[in-house]
Image (cartoon, rainbow, N blue to C red):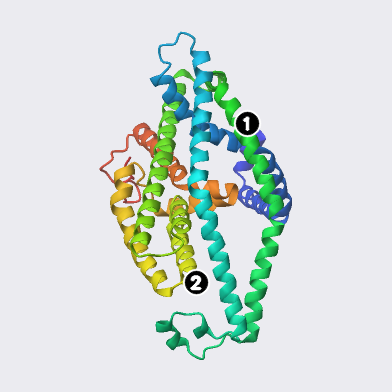
Amino acid sequence: MRLWDKWKKESWFSLAVAICIGVTFYMLLSHIGMFTSFFAGVWAIVKPLLYGLILAYLMDPIARFYQVKLFSKMKKQNIARKICVVLAIITVLIVFTLLIVAVFPPLVQSISSMVTSIAGVVSSLNENSGDLSSILPPAIAKMFKGVSLGPQYMDKITDMFSGSISSIADSSASVGSGIVDALIAFILAIYYMMDKERLQTIAKRFCFMIFKEAKYERFRTIIKRIDSILLNYIKGNIIEGTIVGVINGILMMIFGMPYILLISVVVGVTNLAPTFGPIVGALIGALLLLLQNPVDALIFLIFTVVLQTIDGYIIKPRLFGDSFGVSPLLILISIIIGGRIMGVVGILLAIPFAAIVQFLVNGVWAEYRTKKKIPGSESNISGTTPPQE
């Protein structure tokens, strides 16, 4: 220890530490592929376990609802818990089945109609040597009369569709793997929910061994706050996506547009993803409508902008209030990191993750400000006002 203290006083110590850090960083970057493959392998193992935990977390409020409303006076609460878990699973399966029965047949019909329309467009372009005026409505066809895509562009379009079909065939294996992972996650979610009390007891004992009593109670408060943030976001986001999808369907019905159910489902689902989700949904819907009638595509984009404005200024504030006043930069960083690590699930959880990070940072700052006795209204050393809680 004395030798280390002596070294820290030497003039060469800072340079040696900087060189060691640089060499370590270079070695990490030069072997990044090895680390990436390692973490990819670990993620493939952990993924079903984590997804099962997320699924259990989503279904647990339903089980708690049944336990409070129907079995709160039952003496053996452990048996009541198991009954409520079974009822929650039955409820989820019934809702999922009803959604499939109500949405799936019209959805398949819309997709079939869309594929037929695309095939007709490609066939028409081939027959007319790529003349755009042959597939557009009469009012717009005059603008593109005589405009030809040329054989090289037709070959590219044909190759694009054939390549899409082959990629769909190649991805069937990954879809099958995803189905297996989903089944494993569902089974794990059932076990998680059945053993919830035992798992909570183990977690409490572990945390109690790590933290002192005061810090343990503070840690419990933080966990409860994080749980509240996640549940409020999930419930509000599902309600918001449903409202936006239904309003979109009503507007498309009023204007007599095709693919109403297909596009409304796409808009509602993509609306769940923050920031870029509504843009992706609008572009997909506009491209599908463009194959039938460009005027419908233009009208769709116009009322989508209006709908998203209403969603941003009326629907979202009503559902979430000010509980998610998170920095846009922090949300963007969360989307990038979450998407790279967990894919679609990471993107969907970007906003609550950013809210949790902001909540934790504010808590750390509040503790530091109290410890250092920094007034909230005074300036710090740099001359700027300290961030408020």
For the C terminus, the image quarter is top left
- Give percent across and percent down for residue 344: 55, 50
- Give percent across and percent down for residue 220: 45, 25
- Give percent across and percent down for residue 232: 39, 37
Task: Tell me which amino acid carries mark 1.
Answer: Ile
- Disc 2 or 1, which lies upstream in sequence? 1
Under tag 2, what secondary structure?
Answer: loop
Picture quadrant of residue 221: top left
For the N terminus, the image quarter is top right
Residue with the mark numbered 1: 187
Under tag 1, what secondary structure?
Answer: helix
Residue with the mark numbered 2: 291
Rendered residue at 72%/46% (across/down) = 38
Tell me if residue 87 comes above or below residue 286 in the rendering: above
Instruction: Rate crowding at label 1 as few (under 14), some (14 to 19) or many (20 or more) other CA atoms within 10 Å.
Output: some
Please say whether residue 328 is visible from this viewpoint.
yes
Task: Tell me which amino acid carries mark 2.
Answer: Leu
Q: Is residue 384 left or right of residue 225?
A: left
Report the mark closest to the observer, 2 or 1: 2
Spatial separation of the CA atoms under disc 2 and disc 1: 43 Å
- Give percent across and percent down for residue 304: 37, 62
CB under 8 Å between discs 2 and 1: no
